[in-house]
Image (spheres, coloured by chain):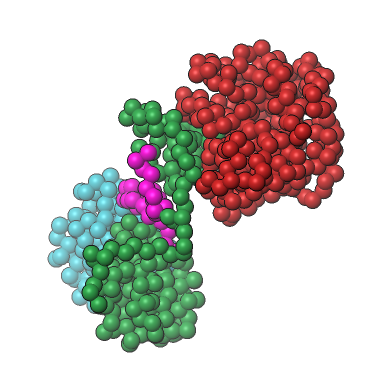
Chain colours: A red, B green, C cyan
Amino acid sequence: MKAESNLKNVLTLNNFAVTAECGPPKGADPGAIQKKGNILKGYVDSVNVTDNQTGVVRLSSMAACTILKQEGLDPVLQMVTRDRNRIALQSDVLGASSLGIRNILCLSGDHQSFGNQRQAKGVFDIDSIQLIQAVRRMRDEGLIIGGEALSEPPQLFIGAVANPFADPFDYRVVRLGKKVAAGAEFIQTQCVYNLKRFKEWMRQVRERGLDKKVYILGGVTPLKSARMAEYMSTQVAGMDVPDDIISRMKGVDPKDQRREGIAIAVETIMALKYMEGVHGVHIMAIEWEDVVPQIVEEAGLYPRPETPEE
Amino acid sequence: MITAERKPMAEIKAMLAPYRKILVVGCGTCVAECASGGEKEVGLLASALRMDAQMEGRTIEVQEMTIDRQCVYEFIDKLTEVADRYDVILSLGCGAGVQAVAEVFPKMFIVPALNTTFIGETKEPGLWVENCRACGDCKLGYFAGICPVTRCAKGLFNGPCGGSKNGVCEVDPDSPCAWQLIVERLDSAGRNDLLEAIYPPADWSRQQGKGPRKIVREDQRSES
Amino acid sequence: MDQKTAGLNITIFFCQQLDIDQDKNRRTLEKELGSQIRFFPLPCSGRIDPLHLLRALESGADMVYLIACPEGACRYREGNLRARKRVGYAQKLIEEIGLEGARIELITGTAATPATIDTIARELLMRDATVGISPVRSKG
């Protein structure tokens, strides 16, 4: 028996899933990953490891996932199409599976011009949807792009991302439909601050019956400060932080702003939990992973369900 | 057209340093349209080079010539009678022009004055924008006449990334999001089929398969 | 005349619309100064090309003026505005070879006191010189 994805097990048993994001260090230190993993262990079902997020060079997602796996966590390998062509991507898909990694999240990746290697050549040989399709076909049919057969197919639970807050709004659900048709089995969304817009997007998702075909995990990022709220609202494209969230953060004494950020995150999780068609939450506490246990507990999502494999 | 921009004077000067007799050659086609390598630009550069040499007390001889096309032999041939009187050719052609001239005059040293930038259109006077990457497999029919390979910063084939906001690209707020335009145009053309279709991985071998690409048309070839 | 810019070669490009009798009006000055002054009438200052300005400097001018109509008074609406950009471009070009950008100057006429081309030119000659003899000429 091959070990299954814990995330897949949690979701297929109709539990409300909790995943968290873990950013690898800008160095070769395995301790940093182990430390973050141990903070999250037991509080989340799976841990995503970002792939050179925002185009900044970090310890590789594959290596960090392997370390987390050794620590007894269920890692989600994030894989962007920005840095590798289809040869390298497919090779890494096989490599990940061989190392016991059981989840993959397919993304196009932030543009290299945002990072610390701005003169790098952006690869973008294939896009995120084409990657989803390729991984699905490798797993289900044992075939790589072009149709050659694999000696052993990879075992991976396949995920993708969705941003309900980017434009053109009405196309967002169409694009989600394309990702599902390409083979995505779970979706992690951009951070939800604008619940009104998220609800409208979910209405469109249900209208198309997509919530029956894919597990949707709403993204949640606790705000550390009013300044962070303003920065995300104005400086980060595709991020929608409404004015009422910003003024709520501003209305609190700076030393209590972290507390307020946690409260907003917990409220958002509760709202997502009772929203039809939402199957879980994905907590992205940027360089603040140690707050995740508290949020999970306050949201009433602790302890996490035991699944057959764990 | 092929667009280009003039290199900084210091770079051109450094490349020309060993030479005294300079033949400055412009091209009357693409680079003339984008005001970087036509007759006027040849005049400006030649004048600047002469003044610069004069100020530094160097004697140089600069001849200006602009041919209709630097990438076609019959036009390059117009340089044949004069070329050997010079030590160097300073070409204001695009990369194709520079190389074609170099090939016709194997004994001449040739130096580029321009940085060839992209295939684009003249959007308005003084504004040129890139809109083709010469991928060798035109997909415009599927994308309502807007090229995602060129005009989407990530070259995405299956819809806008999460950085499309208010119609602009997060990578460059001065550029429209190509996918916003594609979605709008496909929508108004009633092509929902194309909006929902998954576009397969591109065949990049048509762009960079086995090194430099060639087009052979037997009906156009000479007998010998 | 009492020329402050004595010894300098001056080239003046100007818009003909400024002075209908420019042909006649500049003759006295041309005789007086000989090769030290050169006039080039243009149908509109917008017709100036950076190449004209560079060629003038190359053929020995120490100072090149372009005289345009006042802003808002161009017969062709924006010729004088375009002239400003062309002058800016030419200035950048000569600065790249180490020649002062100030050797090229745009002079915008005033609508209030329409003047003849020779009076404008004499005013320019009476100004304090901002540049000396051009290194293109002195070292050439």
How many marks do you count on the picture?
0
Q: Nearer the viewer, residue B216 or C93?
A: B216
Residue A146 in percent (x, y) is at 51, 47
Question: Does residue A104 lie above or below B206 as drawn?
Answer: above
Question: Does residue A245 lie above or below A41 as drawn?
Answer: above
Q: Is residue A19 visible?
A: no
Q: Which of C104 and B193 is in front in this view?
A: B193
Residue A253 in percent (x, y) is at 76, 22
Instruction: Say which residue appears at 80% left-offset and 27% top-offset.
Output: A309
Instruction: Say which residue appears at 17% left-offset and 70% top-offset.
Output: C27
Name the quarter where the C terminus of chain B is drawn: bottom left
Instruction: Say which residue appears at 59% left-offset and 54% top-offset.
Output: A120
Which of the 4 image quadrants contains residue A188?
top right
Residue C39 in percent (x, y) is at 23, 68
Give the magenta part as a residue range. Answer: B115-142
Which of the 4 image quadrants contains residue A106?
top right
Question: Does residue A57 lie above or below B33 as drawn?
Answer: above
Q: Nearer the viewer, residue A69 or A233?
A: A69
Q: Is residue A94 visible?
A: yes
Instruction: Say which residue appears at 15% left-offset and 65% top-offset.
Output: C23
Q: In this view, does A195 lie to the left or right of B17?
A: right
Q: Nearer the viewer, residue B199 or C27?
A: B199
Which of the 4 image quadrants contains residue A247?
top right
Residue A282 in percent (x, y) is at 69, 27
> Residue B125 colored magenta?
yes
Question: Does residue C105 lie above or below A189 as drawn?
Answer: below
Name the quarter where the N terminus of chain B is drawn: bottom left
> Residue B159 colored magenta?
no
